[in-house]
Image (cartoon, rainbow, N blue to C red):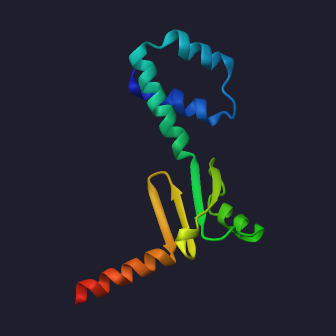
């Protein structure tokens, strides 16, 4: 089985909420060891691509959570909220390979570096 088909198999596996027994048996019995390794690589990649981490300095209330979840409406993702006090204020959104940081800590660091460079 080539890499394209292994990637398609990983996408199909993750798209279902529960892995069917047929898929499990196929993967375990039909794939060679190198194919299984490649399949697992794509499977981990697909699982990671379907997770969103939203970090806030304080625990968000229900309305804010619903607004933030609305950003990903129509996407098959699992949204995880985390509280990270070191942010100071604001939030971080991590999705796939992107990190959107809208925090007071980043603003202060950026301002500090600009002042340091201008001296």
- Residue at image location 47% in from the left, 14% down from the top: 31
Instruction: Give the residue at x 30% y 87%.
Output: 115
Q: Is residue 107 above or below residue 82?
A: below
The quadrant of the rendering that contains the C terminus is: bottom left
Quarter residue 71 falls in? bottom right
Residue 45: x and y in percent read: 48, 39
In this view of the protein, which residue sits in the foreground, 15 or 105?
105
Image height check: is 57 above or below 4? below
Residue 68, horizontal then vertical, whole percent: 65, 65
- 98 to the left or right of 56: left
Name the residue located 62 percent from the left edge and 59 percent from the top edge: 82
Q: Residue shown at 71%/65% (left/top)?
A: 65
Relative image position of residue 102 (x, y in whole percent): 51, 73
Left or right: 35 with respect to 57?
left
Look at the image and tell me in which quarter the N terminus lies: top left
Q: Nearer the viewer, residue 62 or 75?
A: 62
Residue 99 in the image: state x and y as whole percent: 46, 61
């Amino acid at each position: 089985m080539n890499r394209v088909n292994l990637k398609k198999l990983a996408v199909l596996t993750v798209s279902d909420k529960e892995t069917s027994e047929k898929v499990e048996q196929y993967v375990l019995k039909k794939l060679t060891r190198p194919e299984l390794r490649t399949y697992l690589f794509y499977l981990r990649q697909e699982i990671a691509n379907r997770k969103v981490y939203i970090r806030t300095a304080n625990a968000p209330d229900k309305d804010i959570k619903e607004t933030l979840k609305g950003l990903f409406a129509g996407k098959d993702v699992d949204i995880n909220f985390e509280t990270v006090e070191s942010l100071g204020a604001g939030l971080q959104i991590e999705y796939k390979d992107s990190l959107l940081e809208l925090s007071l800590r980043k603003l202060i660091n950026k301002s500090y570096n600009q002042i340091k460079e201008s001296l």
